[in-house]
Amino acid sequence: MEIPKQFDPKECEERIYARWEREGRFQADPDSGKPPYVIVIPPPNVTGALHTGHAMFVTLQDILVRWKRMQGFDALWLPGTDHAGIATQMVVSKEIEKRGMNRLDLGRDAFVEKIWEWRREKGDTILLQLRRLGASCDWSRTRFTLDADLSRAVRKAFVDLYAEGLIYRGEYMVNWCPKCGTALSDLEVEHADTRGKLWHIRYPASDGGEGVVVATTRPETMLGDTGVAVHPDDPRYETLVGQTVVLPLVGRRIPVVADAMVDRAFGTGAVKITPSHDPNDFEAGRRHGLERVAVIGLDGRMTRVAGEEFAGLDRYAARKAVLARLEAEGLLVKVDVHAHAVGHCQRCDTVVEPAVSTQWFLKIEPLAGPARRAVEEGEIRIIPDHWRKVYLNWMSEIHDWCISRQLWWGHRIPAFSCGSCGKSAGVDDPERRLVSMDDLKACPYCGGAVRQDPDVLDTWFSSQLWPFSTLGWPDRSRDLEKYYPTTVMETGYDILFFWVARMIMAGLKFTGRPPFRDVFLHGLVRDARGRKMSKTLGNVIDPLELIDAYGADAVRFTLAILCVPGTDVALDPKRMEGYRAFANKLWNAGRYVLIQTGDAAPAGPAEENLSLWDRWILEELDRTAAQVEASLAEFRFYEAADALYHFVWHRYCDWYVEVSKVGLSPSAPQARREATRHVLFRVLDGVLRLLHPFMPFLTEALWEKMPGRTSPLVSAEYLRPSGRTASNGEAVEALMDLVTQIRTVRTEQGLPPGQSLALHIVPLDPSAARWLEGSARAEVAALARLGEVGVSGDSPEGDGWLPGVALRYRFYLELPAAQKDTAGEGERLRAELKKASAERDKFAAKLGNPAFVEKAPPEVVAKNRAILEDYERKVRETEALLARLED
RNA sequence: GGGCGGUUAGCUCAGCGGAAGAGCGCCUGCCUUACACGCAGGAUGCCGUCAGUUCGAACCUGACACCGCCCACCA
């Protein structure tokens, strides 16, 4: 069989993936009788391109799903995409603007049709990209949030919540993005600390007196002021309360009111009240019955009400103009530098404007209570644990959710209003008949013509239903019965509130059950220096380029091993080189094993034919399997990946494969050769199973080259720890230590690595002697590249032997004839003696402390004692060698 | 203003009560026939500061100092 010396991802990735898909290996089967294991994908935006965040979740979820599938679960990983309201509308708007059109010219229907065209053209791109990473999704169950059945689920949710009075409509102050032209939820506003200014402005008293100085960060809003507030207990303003002051530039008389919301220590202790343009003032205005004067329009420009001088100006131009006028009139008293947080639109980064408008809201408290309890009581587990606290914290101070958006792309709100009788959903609809599952043809109250609300729902309103809407809800489908609740929700912590929290609320509300049992939140992928990736920084890493350069397996393995719960991931392509090398390492180990085994799987040998090393590597494999199992169960991907890496490279390849060359040599007995072949093969087999979820392509490619493999690895059984107990650890470690010591002496003495030298070994105790029986001497020789190896109870005759001390052996390395000079050896031994004595003293002191011996657990004391003995022996032996050397 | 993380080898990070670790980088040798995407050997750490608890602390407790993140309607 021809196996190339380098693993070539390009050769196998596409071919193998196509085979898996063709054979239906990812398909879940509710009638299989197997227990379900379910993950629904965090649906990427339908217009999106694969980024590193996707690569991370694909890697982690695919590891979990493949692992469980191999363990015999009916594993379902359900894929799909999100219509992503604002994001998509923005992308398509920009696109048609490039062609000289705009969405208003086009009109709603035509524009929405354009987006659908776009979606048909590009919408599957991202799903094809997920495949490149090896995602084993059940593509037959792919869903899109705007699919007919999912839209029905959204409508059902809305109708039910409305019927229950949890959805209401009203005029409130909301976050408004002047550029996107829509209301936003609190979560869609990103606060950025900004160094602004605090302007102190004098409002003269109506009677011509001094009046009051107010402090504001937004002077342009003063045009809409309808009051000034001071603290009720503030002696400075006692006499002013109840009076009126004159609003500069406008001339309006506005009252001074007392309100406890005022912080006396801030600014001047007097606050201007603009009920139309500040959430606090909105409330204050209500409390004191103040008029609302809107001077900033929804387009971010000053309204006519702002006065002729300012009308039509952009809000920031108006700020300058207002300040100039105040300055001119001598009313600008003081300007302070003032740092404060300014809200920006998550999508377009425009400064958000608080604005009063009529919107739809979802009452949160009735939903939040059960959602809080589900986590508090452990029905839902959030990992890492500190996110649990964050979740609970957020859940307990959550506000109602503004769910309507003034967009065209999304689920249109199924609410109607009547042109004849004037009844309108949410406001004047006592029997709640104007919201319905079917489009209303006529007013159910008077039969008049009805009009549907033009707004659409926040994208996240449909996302919150994803774990069950994708499975057929509100119908009681077979899938819903079998796969709901899902098993694990795996996603980035950045959408804990946006998505995870809301799914929990919605899941409990609509299905009566939590939508998943475990929530695992991975860190965000950042650049090599830990900075957030951004186009402006130019540090964006494209996962597809990574796959092209290193192969999907290396990309996956890197992401997995970097995934430490609770930490963001610093992704360094340099590091990926290391894991590409790892892939290649395993490839070549497989190549070696397959060349040795030929075209028949080697039969199992009798237990007594297994050597020390054979048993050791099988135990190590077992321990690795147990470690992977335990680590994955707790979502410690890095730990599982690290255990596999270490086992494959530093146990199997570095030691066992090297030792096996002795066992396979023509001079070895037949039984030894067979046993070695068997163990080599068996460990490779186990490694491929264990590693498959992490590196699916490479492992499958090797698997298909193994003799006797009819069905693919993806459907094979995962390796279970066999629970072997007989331990050879001590013996093998002593031998490994011996080899390492010999190599060190060799290198330090500058002996040519290629030269075959003779060695003499003196075991320091009977078990050490026993471990050298059988093939061990030949193995040591091979590992340390030696010639003849002798063993005896005493040092060898003659000159020119370089002595050394290992844990359980003394050894003598024969110098080449031309180099019979051991002069440097004394120095080396003395250095080692010094180190060993220091260690010995440290442990002796510890054990000399009666409190330690008395109070520490016995096994700890015993362990320390054993270490002390090792060092004592080492010191003793080294001293003896030195003494002889100096004779 | 609240809350949550982090501070360990040059870099990125594990370890979280019993001998300071990994990967990359660095230094020395090696094309040893599975692999130079390789092999062998090596150097490198007041485990942020101070005080406590403990037989024992990188790990627990409390303060402090820097970094970072999230939430929040003080103009």
Image (cartoon, coloured by chain):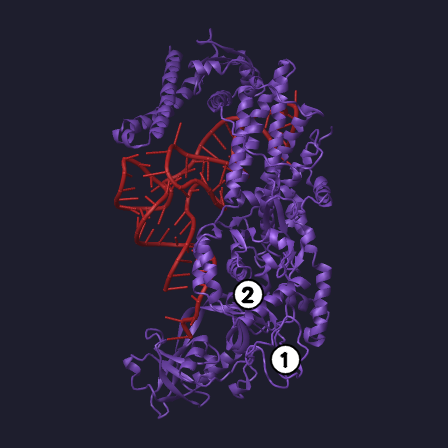
Q: Nearer the viewer, residue A4 or A63?
A: A63
User: Which residue is at the front of the view, A497 or A89?
Assistant: A497
Q: Chain of mark 2?
A: A
Residue drawn 56% across and 55% down?
A533
- Which residue position is annotated with label 1? A444
The quadrant in which residue A552 appears is top right
Write down the colour of chain A.
purple
Callout 2: SS = loop
Considering every residue shown, the one lying at the far top of the view is A797
Residue A704 in which image quadrant: top right
Say which residue label 2 marks: A346
Q: Which chain is red?
A: B
**Looking at the image, residue A120 lies above or below residue B17:** below
**Residue at 38% of width from left, 12% of height from top?**
A886
Observer able to see residue A282: yes
The answer to whether A864 appears left or right of A537 in the picture is: left
Q: Is residue A709 left or right of residue A276?
A: right
Image quarter in which the C terminus of chain A is found: top left
The percent position of residue A215, horizontal first and vertical second, equals: 39, 78
Mark 2 is surrounded, within 10 Å at the Cα level, by few (under 14), some (14 to 19) or many (20 or more) other residues, namely: some
